Image (cartoon, rainbow, N blue to C red):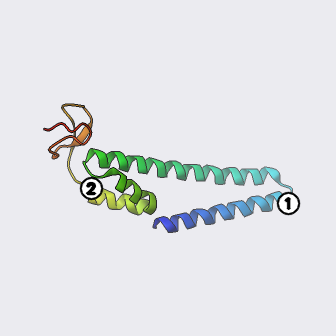
């Protein structure tokens, strides 16, 4: 499922939960309406937190591997899980080791650290 389909599905779920909540409110069942709306809010917050976590992980991993982190962050932001899968298979493969100068992780095949610029 691409990012557009995921957003459409989430919007549809939100619309369904919202109309269900309004239907309960129209019948005078405020507790059920509140429960449905709270559930929709929790689902939305969880989806937002997962998206932010994925974008932060891609940014940090791309920087550690010596690629352009902003470009990958933008790709994942606009394409969602599809961008994450593309990044995972296209990123430089190898073991991350600690830089002898700054101690931050770097790809072991890089000639210099992407964080401090120290040569190996």
Residue drawn at point x = 20 percent, y = 31 percent: 101
Q: Earlier in the sequence, mark 1 or mark 2?
A: 1
Q: Position of residue 25 (x, y in %)?
A: 82, 57
Circle 1 residues within 10 Å: few <14, some 14–19, many ≥20:
few
Q: Identify whether 5 is placed above or below 85.
A: below
Q: Is 22 on the left or on the right of 89, as rendered?
A: right
Q: Which residue is mark 1?
A: 27
Nearest the viewer among 12 and 72 is 72
Element at badge 1? loop
Nearest the viewer among 97 and 110 is 110
Q: Position of residue 62 (x, y in %)?
A: 31, 49
* Mark toward the viewer: 1 or 2: 2
Q: Which residue is mark 2?
A: 91
User: Which residue appears farthest toward the right when viewing the image?
Assistant: 28
C-alpha separation, residue under disc 1 versus residue under disc 2: 54 Å
The picture quadrant where one finds residue 14 is: bottom right
Q: Is 12 on the left or on the right of 83, as rendered?
A: right
Q: Identify whether 10 is placed above or below 61.
A: below
Nearest the viewer among 31 and 49 is 49
Residue drawn at point x = 20 percent, y = 49 percent: 94
The picture quadrant where one finds residue 105 is: top left
Residue drawn at point x = 39 percent, y = 60 percent: 75
Q: Identify whether 36 is placed above or below 107.
A: below
- Count of marks, rendered view: 2
The picture quadrant where one finds residue 78 is: bottom left
Element at badge 2? loop
Q: Is 119 on the left or on the right of 62, as rendered?
A: left
Residue drawn at point x = 24 percent, y = 42 percent: 114
Q: Is 119 on the left or on the right of 72, as rendered?
A: left
User: Which residue appears farthest toward the front when viewing the image?
Assistant: 117
Nearest the viewer among 77 and 11 is 77
């Amino acid at each position: 499922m691409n990012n557009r389909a995921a957003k459409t599905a989430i919007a549809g779920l939100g619309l369904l939960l919202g109309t269900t909540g309004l239907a309960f409110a129209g019948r005078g069942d405020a507790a059920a309406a509140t429960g449905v709306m709270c559930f929709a809010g929790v689902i939305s917050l969880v989806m937002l937190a997962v998206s932010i976590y994925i974008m932060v992980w891609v940014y940090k991993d791309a920087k550690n591997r010596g690629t352009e982190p902003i470009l990958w962050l933008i790709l994942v932001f606009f394409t969602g899980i599809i961008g994450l899968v593309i990044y995972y298979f296209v990123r430089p493969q190898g073991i991350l080791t600690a830089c002898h100068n700054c101690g931050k992780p770097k790809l072991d095949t890089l000639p210099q650290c992407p964080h401090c610029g120290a040569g190996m």
